[in-house]
Amino acid sequence: MSIRIMILPALLALTLTACAQETPAPEAETSPGAATAPTAMTVDRLDGILRRLDSELRHENANWQLTIQERSILVVADAGANRMRIMTPIIRADALPPETWLRMLQANFDSALDARYAIAQDMLFSVFIHPLGSLTPEFLLSGISQVHGAAETFGTTYSSGAIVFGGGDSSELNRDLLRKLQEAEAGDAI
């Protein structure tokens, strides 16, 4: 049985519970003559974009499971609550050593960018949450990339991309890691 099929039921249960707890965003007021916003993202538009990313994705209601570079990514939309969530499981939360909890919170401040490390149902996820209606195709793709990146760099740089927001701890920690890797490559132990 593939990992894709095994993960879907657990993630769907998690997301259906999460969707039921969302509160709809208030309607935005617009004044006459105000510039019109770009076309709002809908569940149908989201479906079309995701199908172009993975022709073998699994889809049920407003939940999609796709594979990006061998990593299972779940996208969940709730049009009524105007929310969208992209996530991927990383590791069971009970397997996390204490120093990792601190490092994840540091990364959420500066190197995870729009993705976040989050825990639900005793599982650590990389997650990106955004209002559905104002989501652009470009930001959707960025969100998927950041969720994938944060999951893949978990345990090393804890980064969702090449940028690190200033003022946090990640830049110095990443420089230390790079120095240790360079020393190890030169023959010194880490």
Image (cartoon, rainbow, N blue to C red):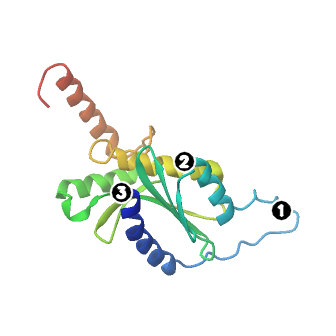
Report the side of 97 relative to 104 (left or right): left
Q: Choose the circle earlier in sequence order: 1 or 2.
A: 1
Crowd class of label 3 (few under 14; some 14 to 19; many from 20; radius 10 Å): few
User: Spatial distance from mark 1 to mark 3, Cα to Cα?
Assistant: 48 Å
Determine which residue is flagged by label 2: 142
What's the residue type where badge 1 is placed? Ala
Report the side of 126 relative to 21 (left or right): left
User: Spatial distance from mark 2 to mark 3, Cα to Cα?
Assistant: 24 Å
Q: Which mark is residue 134?
A: none
Residue placed at 25% from the left, 62% from the top?
92
Q: Secondary structure at mark 1?
A: loop
Q: Is residue 185 above or below residue 18?
A: above
Crowd class of label 1 (few under 14; some 14 to 19; many from 20; radius 10 Å): few
Q: Quadrant of the C terminus?
A: top left
Q: Which mark is residue 34?
A: 1
Residue placed at 40% from the left, 70% from the top?
9
Residues 49 and 127: in front is 49
What's the residue type where badge 3 is placed? Ile
Where's residue 37, x and y in %? 76, 59
Where's residue 126, x and y in %? 39, 56
Instruction: Indicate the quadrant where residue 104 lies.
Output: bottom left
